[in-house]
Image (spheres, rainbow, N blue to C red):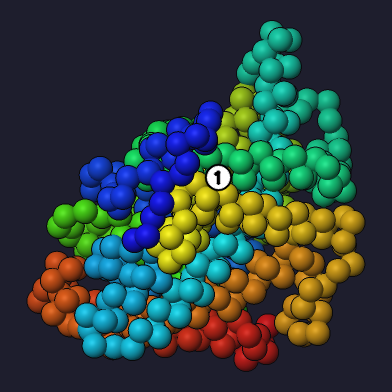
């Protein structure tokens, strides 16, 4: 692999990281359950807890939700199996794994190019992802200070942000965007946590984080959902999420659901290829992939059942869009019993989800640096973590100092987009669909069939069904996402 351990003279915390990852033997997960927790953590992130409820609200609820679930299992699941197969077979970084599968299948090594694209996409996404997660970190601080004030006042079960007007609460977001120093501090803190975990390696870093954070995440998610069922309007929330109004499922909504299925499962960015490469020994990829898909979808649905009862209980708009989490809900917590505590726990929940996803994103280019460039884990994680931090600075300055900058202003699709939205849309509309498309075509048409059957453990009906979905349905559907994302006028949007 060309991996080099760090210098023995390095001191302090970073020398500990090198010691944890300096072995010439490639790292791996300690167990199947560790891999599943890490993979679920990679899939479960802001896309589930923030983006899915936002899109469900904007697209009318029930019909969108049901179509999204169908997309996850008909399109997302076959791609999950395919990405894990590539990593498990190649036992290398994303690019090296695809190249090795191509060699064993008698295909061109040039197929590894879509692995390069995945590495670049993961690097770009983690750069702005850290900025958005910094907003969450800021609200953890706001809600934490508010809950501390409630405890000190002798009323820990009071509502959140008592005495503040709705305008003041909702104005916090604008105040944050207008403060580049504060945005930078939050971005630095979050990226620092992500870099620390990735630099420690698979066993001491990523696996340990996953086995601690994911159970915490699920406890918080279920707990706040139960709270919402008792104090919120669960009946209206269930009706909104699961009663389909098919008239609202127009082509743009269907395209959005397709895209969300890819985004939510972290497909097209080589994350599952990279994580799959750390699997040692036999692994039934079918059951493992189903577990990941079910967990990811379950989190998205629970997030809706967590958020919308509270929204409906206080008469707020479920279609509030991206402001739903950062502006609408903080005001809703003001009127809820124990709102100060629940508000703090809610943003801690989102922060945990953000951390588990960000470490998977940073691990993709870090593994590439180790495998393809021969760098030590410490060097690679510092190079790509530091680089992503710098790109993130440009993204956050796009909300204030560089608010007039339009990086791709010459392209009508991005003409009105600021820096962060440009990076977000470019990766989401172009790079992720392209990565998923080439994954489907390569695995469905070029990968050796015997190799596929051997490594996935699929046979009979399940193998035939998966092969049909990955070879035919996935390229068609993902190609549609790509074309309509580049040419929205096709859908009349």
For disc 1, the marked residue is 195
Name the residue: 67% across, 13% down: 151
Q: Give the camera-side residue of 342 and 289.
A: 289
Question: Which residue is found at the position 86% from the left and 69% from the top?
Answer: 405
- From this view, report whether residue 437 is shown above or below residue 343: below
Which percent across, then down, holds residue 448? Answer: 20, 83
Does 64 appear above or below 391?
A: below
Q: Is residue 187 visible?
A: yes
Q: Position of residue 244 (x, y in %)?
A: 48, 67
Q: Is residue 381 left or right of residue 150?
A: left
The reply to whether residue 367 is in sight is no
> What residue lies at 77% left-to-right and 78% top-to-bottom?
408
Q: Which residue appears at 40% of the width and 62% of the height?
A: 371
Place residue 287 in its image quadrant: bottom left
**Above or below: residue 349 compared with residue 484:** above
Left or right: residue 35 versus residue 48 is left
Where is residue 101 drawn, in percent x and y? 27, 76
**In front of the other: 310 or 341:** 341
């Amino acid at each position: 692999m060309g991996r080099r351990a760090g210098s023995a003279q390095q001191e302090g915390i970073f020398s500990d990281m090198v010691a944890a990852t300096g072995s010439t033997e490639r790292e791996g997960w300690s167990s199947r359950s560790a891999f599943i927790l890490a993979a679920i953590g990679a899939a479960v992130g802001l896309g589930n807890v923030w983006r899915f409820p936002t899109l469900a609200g904007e697209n009318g609820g029930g019909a969108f939700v049901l179509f999204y679930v169908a997309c996850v299992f008909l399109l997302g699941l076959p791609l999950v199996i395919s990405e894990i197969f590539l990593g498990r077979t190649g036992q290398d970084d994303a690019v090296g794994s695809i190249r090795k599968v191509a060699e064993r299948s008698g295909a061109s090594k040039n197929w590894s190019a879509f692995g390069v694209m995945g590495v670049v996409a993961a690097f770009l996404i983690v750069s702005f992802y850290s900025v958005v997660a910094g907003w969450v970190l800021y609200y953890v601080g706001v809600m934490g200070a508010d809950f501390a004030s409630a405890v000190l006042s002798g009323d820990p079960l009071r509502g959140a942000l008592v005495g503040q007007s709705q305008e003041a609460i909702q104005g916090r977001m604008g105040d944050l965007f207008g403060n580049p120093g504060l945005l930078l501090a939050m971005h630095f803190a979050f990226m620092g946590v992500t870099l620390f975990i990735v630099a420690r390696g698979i066993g001491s870093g990523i696996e340990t984080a996953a086995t601690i954070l994911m159970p915490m995440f699920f406890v918080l998610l279920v707990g706040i959902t139960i709270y919402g069922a008792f104090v919120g309007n669960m009946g209206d929330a269930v009706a909104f999420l699961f009663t389909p109004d098919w008239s609202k499922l127009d082509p743009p909504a269907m395209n959005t659901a397709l895209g969300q299925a890819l985004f939510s499962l972290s497909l097209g960015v080589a994350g599952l290829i990279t994580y799959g490469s750390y699997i040692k020994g036999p692994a039934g990829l079918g059951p493992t992939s189903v577990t990941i898909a079910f967990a990811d979808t379950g989190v998205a649905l629970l997030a809706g059942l967590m958020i919308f009862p509270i929204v409906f209980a206080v008469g707020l708009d479920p279609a509030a869009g991206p402001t739903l989490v950062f502006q609408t809900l903080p005001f809703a917590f003001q009127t809820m019993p124990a709102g100060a505590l629940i508000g703090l726990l809610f943003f801690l929940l989102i922060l945990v989800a953000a951390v588990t996803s960000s470490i998977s994103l940073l691990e993709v280019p870090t593994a590439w640096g180790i495998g393809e460039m021969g760098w030590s884990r410490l060097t690679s994680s510092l190079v790509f973590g530091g680089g992503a931090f710098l790109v993130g600075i440009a993204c956050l300055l796009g909300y204030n100092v560089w608010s007039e900058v339009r990086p791709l202003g010459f392209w009508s699709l991005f003409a009105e987009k600021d820096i962060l939205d440009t990076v977000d849309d470019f990766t989401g509309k172009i790079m992720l669909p392209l990565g998923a498309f080439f994954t489907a075509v390569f695995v469905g048409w070029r990968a050796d069939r015997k190799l596929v059957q051997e490594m996935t453990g699929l046979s009979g009906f399940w193998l035939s069904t998966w092969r049909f979905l990955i070879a035919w349905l996935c390229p068609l559907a993902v190609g549609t996402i790509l074309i309509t994302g580049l040419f929205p006028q096709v859908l009349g949007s």
